[in-house]
Image (cartoon, grey):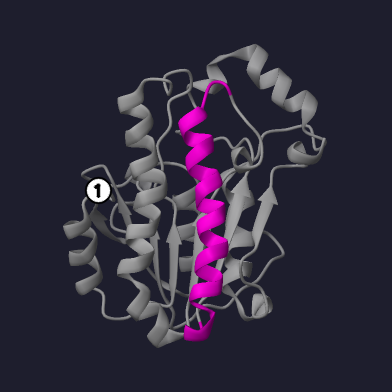
Amino acid sequence: MAGISFDFSGAFVLVVGASRAGIGAAIARAFQDAGAEVAITGAEPEPAEEDRGRFVYTQLDVTDGAAVRALSAAMPRLDVLVNGAAITSRGEEMAPEFFERVVDVNLHGTFRCAEAFHPQLKASKGSLINIASMYATFGSPKNPAYGASKAAVAQLTRSLAIAWAADGIRVNAVAPGFIVTQQSARSRTDPAHVAAVNLRTPMGRWGQPEDIAAPVLFLASPGAAFMTGTCLAIDGGYSVA
């Protein structure tokens, strides 16, 4: 984020799905560096070691509606909600039970959190930012459940943007491409896959989590005050190549 400056002093931000080294954690750190008070959640008992003690942390299963509502009840104020909880497993998603689990976490979990925190976002005229994926726009034979869920997240973003505009809530999304994260570690063990991504990506590389953070902060900032229902592609040009 060198050379990019945002001011979120006094803002309360919740990043759902930020317990591991990846996009959520990078977004949380960027908001904190910009002055926000940041809380994060994750499926693990503790966040990544480098973030322990840095953020207020809640272990949260986004498929548990009661747990999501309890977290909302404990946070009376919220200015920005980032929905980033997601799972995938390359090559294993044709199993019906696992397909259902992926959709429950990635899509239903996104809606559960959005709905639970709607009152706080309405009170603050806040911003909701969902993490979609470039797989929202084209197919993947290795990640069918992930692609289907993220396409639905992009559509949910559009629908909530319309539904909640009268409440003063802006709802946007970002669609990351291939990013170097803990979640993508398994796919990056395949040299042919890594090389194919680099070859197709016009910018010639995989993205870093920090490449996603600044656009998310922009969408939550006054600079994006007339943007809602947008899904920004952040993929080094992969989706247009």
Give the residue at mark 1: 61
Q: Nearer the viewer, residue 213 or 125?
A: 125
- Up/down of 207 relative to 124, above or below: above
Lateral position of residue 230 relative to residue 116, left or right: right
Query: How crowded is the residue under tag 1: few (<14 C-alpha within 10 Å), some, or many (20+)?
Result: some
Amino acid type assigned to the residue bearing label 1 in the image: Asp
- Up/down of 81 relative to 41, above or below: below
Q: Nearer the viewer, residue 210 or 178?
A: 178
Q: Position of residue 16 (x, y in %)?
A: 37, 56
Residue at the spot x=44%, y=79% of the render?
A: 11
Q: Main secondary structure of the magenta part?
A: helix
The quadrant of the rendering that contains the N terminus is bottom right
**Magenta-drawn stretch contains 165:** yes
The quadrant of the rendering that contains the C terminus is top right
Lateral position of residue 171 relative to residue 45, left or right: right
Highlighted range, magenta: 141-168
Task: Tell me, yes or no, if residue 38 can be seen here.
Answer: yes
Q: Position of residue 40 (x, y in %)?
A: 34, 58
- Up/down of 222 relative to 57, above or below: below
Residue at the spot x=51%, y=48% of the render?
A: 152
Lateral position of residue 205 relative to residue 213, left or right: right
Disc 1 element: loop
Lateral position of residue 112 relative to residue 240, left or right: left
Q: Nearer the viewer, residue 132 or 186?
A: 132
Q: Position of residue 105 (x, y in %)?
A: 35, 44
Residue at the spot x=26%, y=74% of the render?
A: 75
